[in-house]
Image: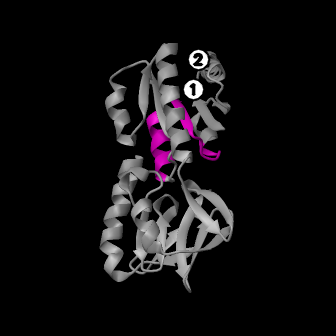
Amino acid sequence: MIRIAVCEDEQVLLDELSGQVSKILEQHSIAYNIESFRNGSALLAREAYDILLLDIEMEPMDGLELAGKLRMRGDDSRLVFITAHQQYAVDAYEVHPFHYLIKPVDSEKLETVLLQLCNSLHKERGRAVIVRQGTAVRRVPLEQIRYLEVLDRKIYLHTVEETVPFYGKLEDLEPALTRPELVPDSFFRCHRSYIVNLRHVQLYDKNEIRLDNEDCIPLSKRRYKSFGLAFMHYLKERGDVF
């Protein structure tokens, strides 16, 4: 299911764009949920979406300001800006949008952008760690993993919902998990006993890393500098605002 939000302060244009999106996704049999907003404040009050289509010229909060606030709180939604003036495109790239479309929105261009985004999301969600537990084999999507911990020769895979124990070595998983192309699910070996998913990091200091569920895991002194560089690179790749 692809979750989409459309934000446009003119009701007629909002209805028109939402209708275009629905028609395109239904034609391609893509499961989706779409919500419409007349202002940025209402959208900020909701949880994150997979795809955001934002009008730049809104009042009182324009699309660029809204996107900046979303990025600052860690929202990594795919942004598509809608604007009547092409010069806004330069400013828009400060928040790393996926694309921008000029009003009136051409249906074919919108279709191309939406299909690219949906394919990217499906590919991202297809990545997983395969865990063997006795004779059972289970698949754990990367985006659900907060961190991996090794204790007494057993790996504990901590997800957003549960902890999954299995026998293995972090050294065997580390090369595959820390590949840079895995953004937005980049992992880092922050301690000899821990690998953390940077997607879920909220803050860190010289001794520990705090995650988005308030769990804290150790950060070794010798990895502090390299972790900081990796985390900053990750945030820039994700499109956060500095």
Q: Which residue is drawn at 55% across and 83% down?
A: 151
Nearest the eye: 224 or 170: 170
Quarter-of-image position of residue 214: bottom right
Provide residue 16's location: percent of width, then percent of height.
Answer: 61, 16
Magenta highlight on residue 70: yes
Identify residue for label 2: 13
Provide residue 1's location: percent of width, then percent of height.
Answer: 66, 38
Nearest the eye: 79 or 196: 196
Task: Left or right? Give the position of 163 relative to 82.
Answer: right
Q: Which residue is drawn at 62% across and 29% down?
A: 38
Which SS class for mark 2?
Answer: helix
Quarter-of-image position of residue 99: top left
Q: How crowded is mark 1: few (under 14 residues within 10 Å), some or many (20 or more)?
A: many
Provide residue 131's location: percent of width, then percent of height.
Answer: 60, 64
Labels 2 & 1 near each other (Cβ < 8 A): yes
Which SS class for mark 1?
Answer: loop
Magenta highlight on residue 52: yes
Q: Can residue 198 be seen in this view?
A: yes
Task: Left or right? Give the position of 15 relative to 183.
Answer: right
**Disc number at residue 8?**
1
Q: Residues within 10 Å of mark 2 (few under 14, many from 20)?
A: some
Residue range in magenta is 44-72
Nearest the eye: 99 or 104: 99
Compared to residue 151, the image places residue 198 above or below, namely above
Provide residue 232's location: percent of width, then percent of height.
Answer: 35, 59
Residues under labels 2 and 1: Cα distance?
A: 7 Å
Q: Which amino acid does label 2 sit on?
A: Leu
Task: Left or right? Give the position of 114 relative to 164.
Answer: left
Q: What residue type is labelled 1?
A: Glu
Compared to residue 14, the image places residue 44 above or below, namely below
Total tally of numbered discs in the picture: 2
Q: Which residue is drawn at 51% across and 53% down?
A: 73
